[in-house]
Amino acid sequence: MSMFSFQVSLSLSSTVLFFLCPHSLVARDIVFPPSAPVQAKLNSDHSTSHNLNPAANPGYYQTYRSAVGADKDHLLDYDKFAGLTTFSNLPWVHCLSPDNDVEKYDIAFLGAPFDTGTTGRPGARFGPTGIRLGSRRIEAPVAWSPYTHDNTFLSWARIVDCGDAPLTFLDNTVALQQLGEAHKIVSGRTANTTEVASVPRIITLGGDHTTTLAALRSTVNHWGPVSVIHFDSHIDTWDPKVLGGGISHYAGVNHGTFLHIAHEEGLILNSSAHAGIRAPTMNKKYDWKNDKRCGFEIITARDIDKIGVQGIIEQLKIRVGDSHVYISVDIDVLDPAFAPATGTVEVGGWTTRELLSILDGLEGLKVIGADVVEVAPAYDNVGETTVLAAAEVAHSLMSLMVETPVKPLKS
Ligand SMILES: [Mn+2]
């Protein structure tokens, strides 16, 4: 197109547009934003239909309301894409403060930015940040489940995000001590709703899987040894002699041996289970025998083809029975189609829907702690497939805790 014809067509189309559009529809004449009064009405509708008025949920609303415009009919109350990013837009509490006077909570999200215990692709130290970003459309006041018609954010429990534990990235031993200490402080405070549950419970956002060891070392203080339901493509009970320990004692503590070490330390019960296993072992017999010795029963990834989601739920429930349960979800339990952003990827895994259905099906178990680990956002795609899945997994874990308050052995 020559410059001349370009100018002609431009001027023609402007002329056509001018005659086709009534003057009132020209963009600059629209009073913007027309949605302000509508939005205010929506807010008040939510308040009445779901009993979300500030009086009914003072803690929640005080946290969310902005001081700016507080007197202007909720104009700047909050928005899920505004402010600093916490898990599901939950209030941030400085749980690790040296002060005793910390806002109370019942369930706490705690990030564990650690990935120097990994044997595959590193990057899970950015997992907590990634999972929080993946959760930003989970909005507590409007998180009503289409399956249960329940909103577990609006329950007896005050749920908060404690931010991340400060962990050195230069010394695994020190980092795990730091994480253990952080867990003890966060779970050592008096809960908010003591008439329901006296000890706060933690959901850790990993971090590579070694971080679960620090969590289990902490939970034993309140709950004693627990059954572990371990969603993973790998067994993670490798004897340090087989994985890493041949290099040094230090190297033997890693994301493939932490369950073996947890067993040695007496942190877990012989009623534990793996779910979603499909990665090869390092030898023909020893790893399987050792796995059983560590207290685990195995549900493989392909078992879902034989017994279905319901069969897996039933098997897990029978396995752990009435015991206290720690649920650890390695995001690599999912097929890489659903979770590419992880360190040690194994094909042939479950779908996100299958995993969420299994997790939600575990309702009624006495879940005393949980985590989502091995999320390494650098390998995610532009659609954020992995972090979105991890966020929903964490949401399901939280709901299990809310649904079943648990009494500790000692508080
Ligand atoms: Mn793992």
Image: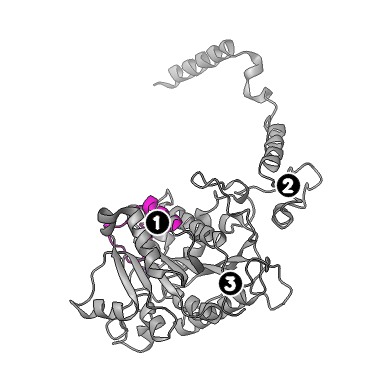
**Secondary structure of residue under mark 1:** helix
> Mark 1: which amino acid?
Ile
Residue 312 horizontal/vertical position (percent):
34, 59
Left or right of 11 in this view: 346: left
| Circle nearer the N terminus (1, 3) | 1
Q: Is residue 348 visible?
A: yes
**Which residue range is magenta in the image?**
340-360
| Residue located 42% across and 49% down the image | 382
Q: Mark 1 points at which residue?
A: 358
Q: Distance between the residues labelled 3 and 2?
A: 30 Å
> Mark 2: which amino acid?
Asn
> Mark 3: which amino acid?
Lys
Q: Mark 2 points at which residue?
A: 53
Nearer mark to the viewer, of 3 and 2? 3
Nearer mark to the viewer, of 1 and 3? 3
Residue 351 is a magenta residue: yes
Q: Sort mark 1 into few (<14), some (14-19) or many (20+) by Cα contacts within 10 Å.
A: many
Determine whether label 3 and label 2 are within 8 Å by CB.
no
Q: Please tell me in which quadrant of the rendered image residue 85 appears.
A: bottom right
Q: Residue furthest left?
A: 284
- Residue 401 is labelled as none
> Where 96 sits versus 338, above or below?
below
Q: How far apart are marks 1 and 2 (CA)?
A: 34 Å
